[in-house]
Amino acid sequence: MATPRTIDINDVIERIGLQRLAIFVLILAFVMMMADGYDFGTLSLAAPAILKEWKIARTEMGAVFSITFIGLLVGSLIYGWIADRFGRRFTIIFGVFNFAIPILLTIWATTVTQLSILRFIGGVGMGGIVPIAYTLVSEYAPRRMRSTVTVITNAGYNIGAALGGLIAAVSIPAYGWQSLYVVGAVFSFIMAAVMILWLPDSLWYLARKHPDSPQLRRLAERLIGQPVVPGTPIVAVDPSEDRSQKASGRQGFLRLFEGSRGWATILLWLLFISDSLGFFFLASWLPVVMGDAGVAPSTASLMASLFVFAGLVGGFLIMRFLDGVGPIAFIALPIIGGPAELVMGIHGLWQTYLLVSIAVAGICLAGIHMAVYAIAVRFYPPSIRGVGMSSATAWGRAGGIIAPYVGGYLLAAHMPMQQLMMWAALPCLTTTILGMGLGLLYRRHFDAPASLPISEQTA
């Protein structure tokens, strides 16, 4: 009897491109990221009402923002390990519950301490599932489209955050800041149910960890569109994985630092810090900053939505260039975004011009925040992609811890608007330099063919 022909999942994906199963996974990840983005943005949108109702100092609210990012940091550190051990599907479902339950309980919070505890616990889930979502969609996509699917997934986060601003403008004046969390809790629990019912696990993970599982065979049949003969070997051969394993016997986290990947890892960590310092300062404090500039609270909420939503334009504009040209393509965003922030700080600026500058800053800064994940996913083979993405995200969370706290301090010091925006624009300079370094490194050492000849795969 002839031996059944081996099915190489990676080869199939590279040949057929973005197929229906991948699109289905992408849609689920996109909507899940909407829930994550909405829930994260609730604190920024509720901050002005909470400050007024609880009569607390801005520095105290800045501390709550920072505690949220500590939770995001912890989640980024531990969820990569969970995903590599228990699978992408389990980790994402667990993470949705991890932030859905605290979001629900926040409705009844009455003190800064309670709010801080709930934001920390929710932050662990919100921060943990983000890199795992990117890892999952990238493992269903061909190499030539990994940046694109990562940006599209991240777009769900931006849309969720932007919808939060629209909802806040209507619901907070009518029903109080708690109404934001009611909507977030309902949305999050619905998403948890959807993930339990329909989210598939990573084909690469199953092929490597559970090659004989019925789930792998069913997913392989959906992938290729035809039945798989029982007993057919299903493997996942990734050229970058093979080269990496041959180059070093190290495992897990240590493999992030082998050869040229070590420099890439360091530059990625610095890039994530720089991005977070620039993005999360405005993402956290923009409604308050605009309120200080004399903008009505409902309008300030809409401006916050504009800032985040405009990032979709930047992300969608840059994603195909990232796949075609490489990481260096994204440096156009900080080069334009820095000056736009400086314009926002001009005293007495007409509101029309202010809106335009916020939109341009959003295109660039929120676009950068989408692009950095699309860049990072290209530097790591599947076996360390989870830990690579999680570790880079963790450093981004560290920047996120610093940004709102420093922002709260600067706002409490009543710093002039122009000077405040000069500090906010500074990370765009470092982001540009780091992007250039990563672009050159990628071109020299990582821009390799997506697949190897069959003779090399089986050697």
Image (spheres, rainbow, N blue to C red):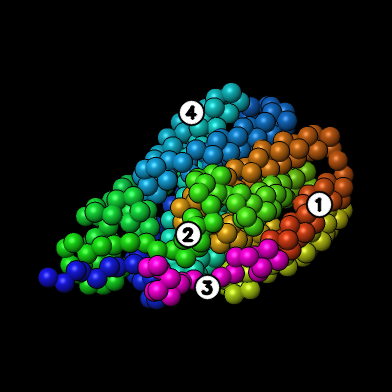
Please indicate, yes or no, whether residue 127 appears anywhere in the rendered image: no
Q: Residue furthest front?
A: 459
Please indicate, yes or no, whether residue 209 appears anywhere in the rendered image: yes
Q: Residue at x 86, y 56 (%)?
A: 346
Mark 4 or mark 2, which is nearer the start of the sequence?
4
Q: Residue furthest left?
A: 1
Residue 3, quarter of picture: bottom left
Q: Identify residue for label 4.
A: 108
Q: Is residue 56 above or below residue 330?
A: above
Amino acid type shown at disc 3: Pro
Whole-Å distance between the Cαs marked 1 and 3? 37 Å
Mark 4 or mark 1, which is nearer the start of the sequence?
4
Disc 3 element: loop
Q: Which residues are magenta?
A: 439-459
Q: Identify residue for label 1.
A: 426
Whole-Å distance between the Cαs marked 3 and 4? 54 Å
Mark 3 or mark 1, which is nearer the start of the sequence?
1
Q: Residues within 10 Å of mark 2 (few under 14, many from 20)?
A: some
Give the label on residue 241, or none: 2
Whole-Å distance between the Cαs marked 1 and 4? 38 Å
Amino acid type shown at disc 4: Trp
Residue 19 in the image, given as x and y percentages of width and height = 37, 71
Amino acid type shown at disc 2: Glu
Going by the image, does 20 lie left or right of 271?
A: left
Disc 1 element: helix
Residue 351 in the image, given as x and y percentages of width and height = 77, 59
Q: Identify residue for label 3.
A: 449
